[in-house]
Image: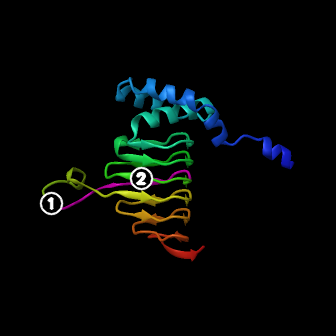
């Protein structure tokens, strides 16, 4: 690819900015639909990867979550629960088959990439009442904060109460149960510092 071809190729950000007025109008209209219907539409278009379905997912996402930035790409079969406690910044990609539980609050900063098959969990069962099966015990919630400029590789589990600081990388398959410092690669089960960058 020549320099001219690269220069002429539109980025997702360019396409988003070019269509921003239409997107804003669709979000405005979408907010008039009942929540259950918006989620039904989400589930219906979830398996498709073509650009119109990606755009529709963005419109639905922006109409349902607490705060939503611009130029967000949500892949196929991404599941959200407790939408109203989720915040996502600008230029974020969440790849296929991710699961985000916003019960305790999830905040994702700008320029974040979350690879496929990753789970972000802000709620967990406790087991303090021995008279009940664990699944019927109460749920404990803890917020998750993913700062700007973070790459979370495939198959990671981000647990409640965690802060992932700026310009950090979570290696594939990691289970993050403690804060991650800036400018570092963390990986393993449980995740630990692998390298500073």
23 vs 1, left or right, is left
> Which is nearer the eye, 86 or 122?
86
Where does the image place residue 91, in percent across and percent down from the top left?
A: 57, 48
Find residue 184 and report its image quarter: bottom right
- Residue at 23% of width from left, 55% of height from top? 134
Q: Is residue 13 visible?
A: yes
Q: Secondary structure at mark 2?
A: strand
Where does the image place residue 100, in percent across and percent down from the top left?
A: 42, 48
- Residue at 40% of width from left, 27% of height from top? 31
Q: Are marks 1 and 2 in contact (CB under 8 Å)?
A: no
Q: CA distance from mark 1 to mark 2?
A: 34 Å
Q: Secondary structure at mark 1?
A: loop
How packed is label 1: few (under 14 Cα within 10 Å), some, or many (20 or more)? few
- Residue at 76% of width from left, 41% of height from top? 9
Assess whether residue 123 is covered by the magenta stretch: yes
For the record, the magenta segment spans 114-128
Give the tally of numbered discs: 2
174 vs 179, left or right, is right
- Residue 7 is tagged as none
How packed is label 2: few (under 14 Cα within 10 Å), some, or many (20 or more)? some
Assess whether residue 190 is covered by the magenta stretch: no
Return the residue found at the far right.
2
Q: Does label 1 or label 2 sit earlier along the sequence?
A: 2
Where does the image place residue 25, in percent across and percent down from the top left?
A: 50, 25
- Residue 107 is tagged as 2
Where does the image place residue 135, in percent across and percent down from the top left?
A: 25, 51
Q: Which residue is mark 1?
A: 130
162 vs 169, left or right, is left
């Amino acid at each position: 690819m020549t320099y001219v071809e690269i220069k002429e190729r539109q980025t997702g950000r360019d396409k988003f900015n070019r269509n921003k007025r239409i997107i804003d109008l669709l979000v405005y209209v979408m907010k008039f639909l009942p929540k259950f219907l918006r989620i039904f539409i989400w589930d219906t278009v979830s398996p498709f990867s073509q650009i119109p379905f990606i755009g529709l997912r963005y419109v639905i996402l922006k109409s349902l979550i607490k705060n939503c930035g611009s130029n967000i790409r949500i892949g196929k079969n991404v599941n959200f629960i407790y939408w109203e406690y989720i915040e996502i910044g600008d230029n974020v990609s969440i790849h296929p088959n991710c699961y985000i539980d916003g019960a305790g609050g999830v905040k994702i900063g700008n320029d974040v990439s979350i690879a496929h098959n990753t789970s972000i969990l802000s709620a967990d069962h406790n087991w303090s009442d021995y008279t009940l099966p664990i699944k019927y015990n109460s749920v404990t919630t803890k917020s998750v904060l993913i700062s700007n400029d973070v790459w979370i590789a495939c198959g990671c589990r981000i647990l409640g109460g965690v802060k992932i600081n700026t310009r950090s990388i979570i290696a594939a398959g990691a289970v993050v149960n403690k804060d991650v410092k800036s400018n570092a690669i963390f990986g393993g089960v449980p995740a630990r510092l692998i390298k500073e960058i």
